[in-house]
Image: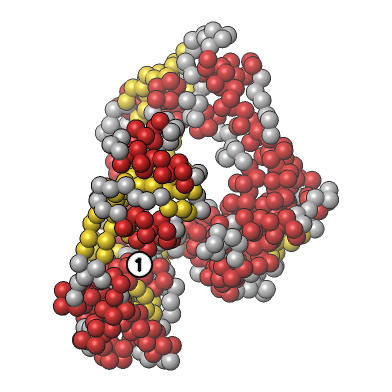
Amino acid sequence: MFQFFRNFFKTKLGLAVALAFLGLIALAFASADVSSTGTFGGIAGGDRVAVVGDEKISTSELVTGANNGLERVRQQDPTLSMPEFVAGGQLEQVLEALVDRHAILGYAEKYGLRAGENLLNSEIRMIPAFRGADGNFSEETYRQALALQRITDAQVRSDLGVGLLSQQMLIPAGFGASVPDKLAYRYAQLFKERRQGSIALLPAATYAPTGAADPKVLRSHYDRNREAFVRPERRVIRFSTFDSDALGDRIEPTDAEIAARYERDADQYAASETRDFTQLIVPTEAAAKSIRDRVAGGASFEQVAREAGLRASPVADVDRSGLASQASPAVAAAYFSAEQGAMTTPARSSLGWHVARIDAVDTAPARSLAEVRGEITDTLREEKRVRGLADLATEIEDQLADGATLAEVADDLDLDLSTVGPALADGRIFESPDRSVPEVLRPALATAFQMDVEEPEIAPVDGGQTYLVYEVGDITPAAVAPYGEIEQLVEAHWRAAEGMKAAQAAADRVMSRVRGGSTIAAALAAEDRRVPPAQSVDMTREDLARQREQRVPPPIALLFSMAENTTKKLEAGGNTGFFVVNVNNIAMDDIADNDPLIAQAKRQMGPLLGEEYAEQLRLAMREELGVSRNSSAIEAVRKQLIGN
């Protein structure tokens, strides 16, 4: 119930801070595609973006981290471009992760902490992704995984080493943190806090400029906000599919193949007999004979077993060979020579002496080739289909490896080639968001956006029922759209931006009037534009806790973080305008010293306090080692990444 305190009191993220650091480090280094990073040896601003202690963070490290961070974010948003990534503040986060990495390494080295080779080996062996089919660590699987991600063993060990060092230092810093009783009481009391106020929205659309726009103003707006007009990378994809129809008559079994399969599985089609029986296993032959004789004399088999302190076990659908392997040939001979309803003669196995009552006998006559021909034909056809498709796919793969084009393969197999695109990485068709690529292409999209032009690939789809052969016909990289093609979009963006500026100014005016003694309703009415009325709010933190499974609206969160009789503004998302939030009254109820909320607050706030301790240690590491940033080099990297 105290989850919302994270939002309102700005506590740090994550309990296991060491693991969080490992995640931050991974953002910059894990799955690194070093081959695509390039170098920055001669750019303006120097070859370093920061220095931590005596260690330099190079411009190439920052570019590598940015590239890898973008790839990671693209797993959730495939169309995100580098300019959008940078504009969202992600480059700064990557740099901070690099600074943390070097600070942890420098601090650990200074005080003699280390992650030895044996410890690293142990950690690698514990990663499930590196286990083979037997569940144990596989060197081959490990190497294949690294090759797939295009990273080296040294990089993996370096990242794991930093993570282990952070665990050694940061987890103990926050371990066992406890909250004082008075602080827990105060937080538990806040649960009963009631706030009354108002929230008003000043829409940007209301304040947006009207009338014709000056072309010079629009062009200037375009030049200043080029990153807002970046078109994502799109690709034209050519493809074709084939299934068992491409094999023609090759999958139809011949008479000779059917006869050979019938002969191979002759035992399967021979006459068979299975039996159900109820049995006992006793230590001696005499005991087995005694039981058999009593049952033969008219006693109940189950009753005789109970009197002997045993329980007769029913067994169903057993054939002679199976029984011989499970028990012994002698037991099988005895059980399969008795008539239905009769008791068997005692027979011995490694478990003891067996005696049984035959409950049922099920016999099946032999089946001739004519009778099972259809069954064998279907089996052989499916086997030849699967094998033939795999062989054909291998043959095509070899042709592609030898330089054959997609058109040549399609012509050879008499396949129809289709072209789709330009497509975005998420499958939508550029400029036609209501359309998307065919479903058969979706499993191959991620690979298609990593391929070069006219380098065809083949992949199974539909669980191997169909194969897809495809290539990238054309690549249009992410870039700022030419002004002449998006004038209307630029104008809409300009109006929205100007509307936001005017809405912000209006919010300042409304706040000024409220602070001067006006009610928020009167302050809104004083505007020369007609705006929506303010909405009253009257709720407690307990009310918020009931909504913890939902996202708390930002203006409500702001209202619960403000002082009484104060007014603040808050930008609404999506360029929709500005909120003006006013708090009129804050009331607080007392709670008993033994209220269960206090104990609950101590339990839930302890980990948060531990996070704070670990966070302070992290900052102290930076301060002790010393961190300096080269703003000109950082800016140069930023411009290089966004293509300026």
Q: Which of 455 and 634 is in front in this view?
A: 455
- What residue is disc 1 on? 443
Q: In this view, does 543 lie above or below 69?
A: above
- Residue furthest out toward the left: 370
Q: Nearer the viewer, residue 104 or 560?
A: 104
Q: Where is residue 390 in the image (x, y as percent from the top left)?
A: 35, 79
Q: In the image, what residue occupies the spot 26% across and 71% down?
A: 270
Image check: 510 left or right of 407? right
Q: Is residue 263 above or below residue 404?
A: above
Q: Position of residue 31 (x, y in %)?
A: 56, 64
Q: In the image, what residue occupies the spot 45% across and 41% down?
A: 287
Q: In this view, does 298 lie above or below 325?
A: above
Going by the numbered disc 1, the residue's amino acid type is: Pro
**How many residues crowd mark 1 within 10 Å: few (<14), some (14–19), many (20+)?**
some
Q: In the image, what residue occupies the spot 43% across and 77% down?
A: 451
Q: Where is residue 87 in the image (x, y as percent from the top left)?
A: 49, 56
Does residue 95 appear anywhere in the picture? no
Image check: 546 left or right of 246? right
Q: In this view, does 624 lie above or below 472?
A: above
Q: Where is residue 359 in the image (x, y as percent from the top left)?
A: 27, 47
Q: Which of 40 and 201 is in front in this view?
A: 40
Q: Nearer the viewer, residue 535 or 97?
A: 97
Does residue 395 appear anywhere in the picture? yes
Which secondary structure lies at badge 1?
helix
